[in-house]
Amino acid sequence: MSKIDAKVVLLGKAHVGKTCLVNRYIRGTFDSTVPYQNTIGAAFGSKKETVNGKSIILGIWDTAGHERYESMVKLYYRGAMAAILCFDLTDKTSFDRVRFWAGELRQMEKGCKLFLCGTKKDLVDYDAYKREITVKTAKPLADDLQAALFETSSKSGENIEQLFQSVAKYCLQKTEEDERKQHGEEDRIRLGREKSYLLNRRCIRIPKCL
């Protein structure tokens, strides 16, 4: 796909499952037998979504979560329309790190829309004792960041489509809103020029023929 309509970045601590999330969404796959590999810098993928009969192509950047890559990851914030902040439902430290990523984004891209995503829901559904972050715990942070909250499973695919549909819906609305503003500004400039032209014509006096 050559034309990307909206840039989306995935942020979160290492091992929270960002790459698995993207693979499940874009390719519909999950392979637990593949050894875990750290993302270096960022990996890119894209997918077309349809919202209310309208299409939008999401360009998704899966960024590295290790602290040693933080300065590199900042390069991928620029121009992001939406960001998915991921945390592992079985790891409280990954949730504690979410506010850091949110702060980074607010500094680099103030208009970027945030979405909170708790990963590995299949693990806590299978064994409730593994859950360290509940909806009750996460909701206040989501409200504070004005972010939608999702709990997902890359293994089962639960809520993956719902998450990205929500992202696509926001991006489409934002794109259309920006286009309307741009057209409105262009119309304002055009009307201003036409008005100026007409006023100037009235000021020009044509001498009578002798």
Image (cartoon, helix red, strand yellow):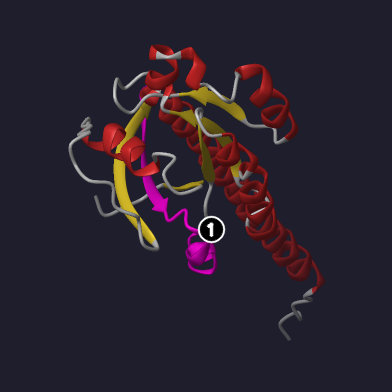
Residue 52 visible, this orientation: no
Q: Quadrant of residue 198?
A: bottom right
Tell how many labels.
Answer: 1
In the picture shown, does residue 209 fall above or below 167? below
Residue 190 location (% of width, % of height)? 63, 58
In the picture shown, does residue 157 fall above or below 199? above
Quarter of the picture containing the C terminus is bottom right
How packed mark 1 is, by other alpha carbons closer than 10 Å (few <14, some 14-19, many 20 or more), is: many
Residue 90 visible, this orientation: yes
Q: Residue at x 34, y 55 (%)?
A: 38
Magenta part of the chain = 53-77
Residue 143 location (% of width, % of height)? 72, 27
Q: Residue at x 22, y 30 (%)?
A: 28
Q: Quadrant of residue 31?
A: top left
Residue sitting at the far right: 203
Q: Is residue 180 left or right of residue 196?
A: left
In the picture shown, does residue 140 fall above or below 202? above
Q: Give the amino acid at mark 1.
A: Tyr
Q: Residue at x 45, y 27 (%)?
A: 163
Q: Nearer the viewer, residue 151 or 146?
A: 151
Q: Is residue 132 left or right of residue 103?
A: left
- Give the residue pinned by disc 1: 77
Q: Give SS at disc 1.
A: loop
Residue 66 location (% of width, % of height)? 47, 57
